[in-house]
Image (tube, grey):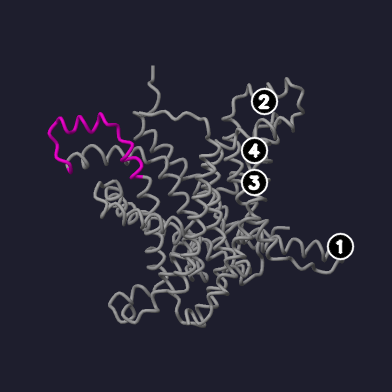
């Protein structure tokens, strides 16, 4: 029932061999998915550490706007966020006439902006939760050592919160991996985008999407395994004591 | 006029989104209960089947599953119909959407219910059996009312993700909010306003959901003592 010849024929397209080019010569397929994921996770994490500090700030003029940002981005579908950025910005003449328009026209840039904002909203909440969970003894000790507030944040609170955020963050990474599949809806050729092109060419639905699914499943298993290793390395102190 | 009168059309789409989400939730809860039952069953093949279901579904993006189940399922049904000599049946997109999203979120619900059932003390079920209740009656009278409290936090989360996932169904041809927004966007030339309105409706749905679910969580935690530090 499943046409294996078609799978064998089209498999290279998922690895960047578009239009008969050698594999990995274009960033289509697997590489595009990984690129979108890596860039948005990188920028998202970089944004969310300062945002998390703002989220737990006692100053409500800082804490409230950060709360609003995470609330709005966690309460709406990422597809809507992507469409607001990709289609929506063209509504404003001042955006179209600005220097940034050259970049904002590209689906790639828009996807990375949307994914970055979305993941940073979730990650901010994850990190902020762990900052609040910091044991009071650690903070007392830091104060007793005469650390200033920022030194304490930098040396004690943030490093330990980031470690403890690892299990929840691994979930977020896997959600983002799957979330990047919507990039195909704004013309990008990620794994799902490539599968859709093959579907449009051949009218065979099972083969291309099952192959794309197999890629995602493999990546998910791989990430789960990597994060397990990372947790063993960085969260060993939270585990049960070894005899 | 705001959005050249396209607001009612978007609200129509919102109604369809809500109906779709509600119906999918029912399907996913049923599948989740079955899946959790299989995972906790004493039969190895049933456990493997449930494990396969929840792993395969959760490891692949919703959007890809929609394509596989919707387009693939359609082709499969047409193939079977042709082989049997029947006319190709018309597949109702709403039904297909409900089944697709229900099957996807059933996998997430399986995990939710499995954890919640395991959190109910075993002695409760044993006591029910000791009273001579049938296994099914023990399940609905003893297990379910007590597991709700443990299931609610993860159930709430699944529901919120499910609502947001419905934004994808326009790709399988449903006239939901995103589909109406696409039409409104092309006609009004105000894509930003259109999608911000859609986003605001989604935010309203999630906000109301959170309020209701928090109230339910308080209701089902009546009498549970919280530890205070």
Q: Earlier in the sequence, mark 4 or mark 3?
A: 3
User: Which element carries disc 3, helix, strand or loop?
Assistant: helix
Which span is picked out in magenta? A127-150
Q: Is residue B103 left or right of residue A71?
A: right
Question: Which numbered disc, 4 or 3, marks the residue closer to the eye?
Answer: 3
> What is the C-alpha distance between the residues marked 1 and 3?
34 Å
Q: Residue at x 38, y 21 (%)?
A: A241
Q: Earlier in the sequence, mark 3 or mark 2?
A: 3
User: Which element carries disc 2, helix, strand or loop?
Assistant: helix
Q: Quadrant of residue A140?
A: top left
Can you say whether A170 is above or below B142 in the image? below
Q: Give the label on residue B99, or none.
A: none
**x and y, in percent, of residue A24 in the image:** 45, 62
> What is the C-alpha distance between the residues marked 2 and 1?
48 Å
Name the residue beneath numbered marker 1: B84
> What is the C-alpha distance between the residues marked 3 and 2?
21 Å
Name the residue beneath numbered marker 4: B36
**x and y, in percent, of residue B21 in the image:** 61, 57
| Callout 2–callout 4 Cβ contact below 8 Å | no
Question: Which numbered disc, 2 or 1, marks the residue closer to the eye?
Answer: 2
Q: Predominant secondary structure in magenta?
A: helix
| Callout 4–callout 3 Cβ contact below 8 Å | no
User: Which element carries disc 1, helix, strand or loop?
Assistant: helix
Q: Give the label on residue B125, or none.
A: 2
Q: Residues within 10 Å of mark 4 (few under 14, many from 20)?
A: many
Chain bearing mark 4: B
Can you say whether A108 is above or below B136 in the image? below
Query: Residue A136 colored magenta?
Result: yes
**x and y, in percent, of residue A158 in the image:** 27, 41
Name the residue beneath numbered marker 3: B29
Q: Residue at x 53, y 47 (%)?
A: B213
Q: Earlier in the sequence, mark 1 or mark 3?
A: 3
């Amino acid at each position: 029932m499943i046409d294996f010849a078609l799978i064998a024929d089209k498999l290279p397209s998922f690895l960047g061999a578009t239009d008969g080019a050698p594999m990995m010569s274009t960033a289509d397929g697997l590489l595009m998915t990984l690129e979108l994921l890596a860039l948005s996770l990188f920028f998202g994490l970089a944004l969310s550490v300062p945002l998390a500090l703002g989220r737990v700030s006692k100053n409500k003029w800082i804490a409230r706007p950060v709360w609003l940002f995470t609330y709005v981005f966690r309460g709406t579908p990422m597809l809507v966020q992507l469409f607001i950025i990709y289609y929506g910005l063209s509504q404003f003449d001042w955006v179209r006439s600005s220097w940034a328009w050259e970049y904002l026209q590209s689906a790639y840039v828009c996807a990375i902006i949307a994914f970055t904002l979305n993941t940073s909203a979730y990650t901010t909440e994850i990190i902020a939760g762990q900052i609040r969970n910091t044991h009071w003894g650690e903070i007392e000790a830091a104060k007793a050592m005469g650390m200033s507030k920022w030194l304490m944040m930098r040396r004690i609170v943030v490093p330990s919160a980031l470690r403890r955020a690892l299990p929840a963050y691994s979930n977020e990474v896997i959600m983002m991996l799957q979330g990047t599949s919507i990039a195909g809806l704004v013309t990008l050729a990620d794994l799902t985008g490539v599968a859709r092109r093959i579907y449009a060419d051949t009218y065979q639905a099972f083969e291309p999407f099952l192959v794309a699914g197999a890629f995602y499943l493999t990546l998910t298993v791989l990430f789960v395994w990597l994060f397990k290793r990372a947790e063993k390395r960085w969260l060993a102190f939270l585990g049960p004591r070894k005899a | 006029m705001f959005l050249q009168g396209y607001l009612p059309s978007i609200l129509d789409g919102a109604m369809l989104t809500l109906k779709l989400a509600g119906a999918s939730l029912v399907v996913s809860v049923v599948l989740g209960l079955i899946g959790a039952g299989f995972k906790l069953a004493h039969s190895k093949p049933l456990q493997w089947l449930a494990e396969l279901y929840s792993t395969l579904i959760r490891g692949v993006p919703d959007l890809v599953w929609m394509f596989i189940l919707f387009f693939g399922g359609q082709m499969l049904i047409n193939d079977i119909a042709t082989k049997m000599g029947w006319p190709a049946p018309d597949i109702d997109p709403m039904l297909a959407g409900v089944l697709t999203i229900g099957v996807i979120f059933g996998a997430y619900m399986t995990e939710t219910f499995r954890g919640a059932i395991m959190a109910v003390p075993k002695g409760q079920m044993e006591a029910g059996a000791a009273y001579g209740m049938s296994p099914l009656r023990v399940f609905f009278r003893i297990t379910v009312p007590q597991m709700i409290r443990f299931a609610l936090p993860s159930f709430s989360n699944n529901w919120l993700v499910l609502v947001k996932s419905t934004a994808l169904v326009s790709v399988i041809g449903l006239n939901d909010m995103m589909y109406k927004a696409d039409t409104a966007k092309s006609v009004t030339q105000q894509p930003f306003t259109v999608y911000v309105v859609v986003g605001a409706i989604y935010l309203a749905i999630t906000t109301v959901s959170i309020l209701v679910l928090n109230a339910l969580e308080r209701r089902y935690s009546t009498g549970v003592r919280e530890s205070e530090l």
